[in-house]
Amino acid sequence: MAIDLLTAVMVCEGVEEATPEFQLECWQYLVDTGRAWTLQGCFGRTAAALIQAGLINKPNGGVPDDEAK
């Protein structure tokens, strides 16, 4: 399944069922595109927690300082 913004948001919010692997791919998509930091605060906080846990990677530009705490 191709990932686009709508798919990623629906999966990350739990509206659309997905495997754990695809869920992480969707979170990585939101981080890589920078959208994790522009959506509701819970997206940025969850993305930062997943990065800190080593489950997904930082984007090329890094995590915004206020989101990494």
Image (cartoon, rainbow, N blue to C red):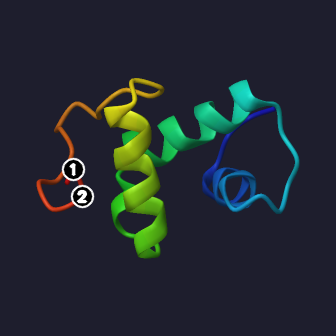
Proximity of marks 2 and 1: CB atoms separated by less than 8 Å: yes
Label placed on residue 68: 1
Quadrant location, the N terminus = top right
Task: Please give the name of the residue rendered at 11% of the width and 54% of the height, measured from the top-left corner.
Answer: 65
Q: In this view, does 51 lie to the left or right of 29?
A: left
Q: Which residue lies furthest to the left in this view?
A: 65
- Quarter of the image holding residue 61? top left
Position of residue 68 relative to residue 66, above or below, is above
Quarter of the C terminus within the rendering? bottom left
Q: Residue furthest right?
A: 17
| Type of amino acid at the residue the image marks with label 1 | Ala
Within 10 Å of the Cα at label 2, are there few (<14), some (14-19), or many (20+) other Cα atoms?
some
Residue drawn at (48%, 48%) of the image: 30
Between 3 and 10, the residue placed more toward the observer is 10
* Residue 15: mark: none
On the question of residue 63 being in view, the answer is yes
Report the residue marked by disc 2.
67
* Residue 5 percent coordinates (x, y): 60, 55
How far is disc 2 from disc 1 in space, using C-alphas? 4 Å
Residue 33 seen from this side: no
- Indicate the secondary structure of the residue bearing disc 2: loop
At x 85%, y 55%, the residue is: 16
Give the class, few, some or many, for how many residues have Cα within 10 Å of label 1's Cα (few <14, many ≥20).
some
Secondary structure beneath label 1: loop
Q: Where is residue 68 in the image (x, y as percent from the top left)?
A: 21, 50
- In the rendered structure, the answer to whether residue 23 lies left or right of residue 33 reads right
User: Label 2 amino acid?
Assistant: Glu
Is 32 above or below relative to 36?
above
